[in-house]
Amino acid sequence: MIVSRFPTGRLRISRVVYFTNLQRTDSREIPVGVVGEVTLSGLRGVGTAFRPSFSTDELALMGPLMRDILTHPSDVLWPEFLEIFKTSEPGAALDLFAQRHASSLSVLAPTPLDVPRQWLLERDNTRLQEIVRDRIKVILTDEYFKFLFPPRGDGQTVDDPTVEERVAKLGA
Amino acid sequence: MPNYRNFSAELEVLADVWSTSVMSTDTWNLTGKKWGTNSQPFEVANQNNIRGVAKPGAIINDRCLRAAHEKIVSDLAYVLSLPVPPVVLWDRSEGHVGDRYAAISAWAFAKANEWQVVKPRLKPAQTDAAKRIAGAMRAFDTWIAASDRKGSHVLVSDDGVEDTISVAQIDYAFALSWEWCGVAGAQAEPRAAFPDGVGFDQGVCDEIADNIEKLEEVRISEIVNRVPVEYYSAIPGAKDVILSQLVRRRGVLKGWLK
């Protein structure tokens, strides 16, 4: 009998949102960005695409402490996510990150995305790292813009955002 | 009785209502937002635009009586003036695909951050205040056998106030029958003090243990027994076990907390 092993993987993306009033739905929710995690048999990685900054109006709606943190989201949230990634079991980083942020700043439940077949079939690890890195940037950017669009009618700006995307620690 | 609930007057009005009722009569709608944590909580809103966090968000076959635990713990905390947000039960009605019997927790604060975010930035007066709350909750968490306490289950109001701290302890799904009915092994007593990393006030801990000891059995019984039997269905006999353990542990609590 011949048994072939079908390669599998997992790619999940979570939206990150700031609730300006946790207690009421008739309040603004400010998109912060997206975070993602990919887990393949021989490779794992995480990436983020956070807004580079927020408008004065948006910052005014935040609590003082979180306003400090979100003035430059990537400076605080990326190192935190990366640290979790480095110390967690494969595939667990996104869930752990979400557990840490489930109040005003919320990492919402992840959405599974199709894993590109090329990722599953590529056997050259160096090449795999390259294609995952390139593609995850595109995916994160796409998900980031899906999250920001359509623009809300309340002054939220979406023009010329600088997407910060990174893929970390690729390799088995 | 000292009050460790630094909640708004508006929230306390809601707590007055929810702590003396069992089932929600509001119309709750799903907003579409979900969190990926263990109980798969999801956001709901009522006809007055009040947000709540409902759980469980799916049938989870681990015999954890999430909704019942959340409700009982919240009501006990209310009686003791401890900072657990109000909870009400929500029957999602016959025909609902998934777990029909849910609990809805109110948000304690308009803006809040998890303890691990706040802890490095505490002012001295806030550390002192946190120490008192940790003392109070050490007694309470030990009494109810809270087995899943961590920084992310302690929310701190992001209100800019620097001379004190407003804290809410959330997520008590894994308490009460979780250990008492043998679903999980019993942890050592006493339980760790949360918020963590600031120590705890032993005097406050003793004070709350006193208050727990003085709680009338009839009051505890009312809180446990009014939860409908369907909410205990995963563990036959759980209601009796919860009640008897709460009553029994009142008397031995001080010994554990010394």
Image (cartoon, grey):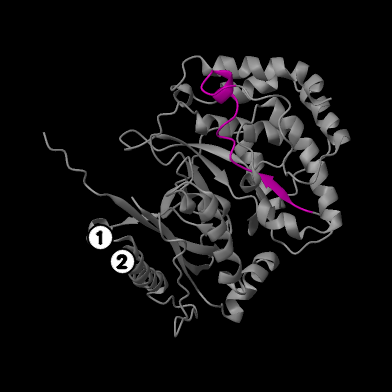
The tag earlier along the polypeptide, 2 or 1, is: 1
Q: Which residues are magenta?
A: B165-185
Side of A39 relative to B104 (left or right):
left
The image shows residue A77, relative to residue B146, as above or below, that is: below
Question: Which percent across, then down, holds residue A54?
Answer: 56, 77
Whether pointer 2 and pointer 1 mark residues with C-beta atoms closer than 8 Å, the reply is yes
Side of A16 relative to A112 (left or right):
right
The image shows residue A154, relative to residue B148, as above or below, that is: below
Q: Is residue B38 visible?
A: yes
The residue at the far bottom in this view is: A160
Side of B1 relative to A40 (left or right):
right
* Label of residue A142 in the image: none
Amino acid type assigned to the residue bearing label 2 in the image: Arg
The residue sitting at 16% across, 38% down in the picture is A3
Q: Quadrant of the N terminus of chain A?
A: top left
Distance from disc 2 to disc 1, alpha carbons, whole Å, reads 8 Å
Residue A167 falls within the magenta-colored stretch: no
Residue carrying label 2: A127
Label 2: which secondary element: helix
Residue B170 falls within the magenta-colored stretch: yes
What is the magenta segment's predominant secondary structure?
Answer: loop
Q: Chain of mark 2?
A: A
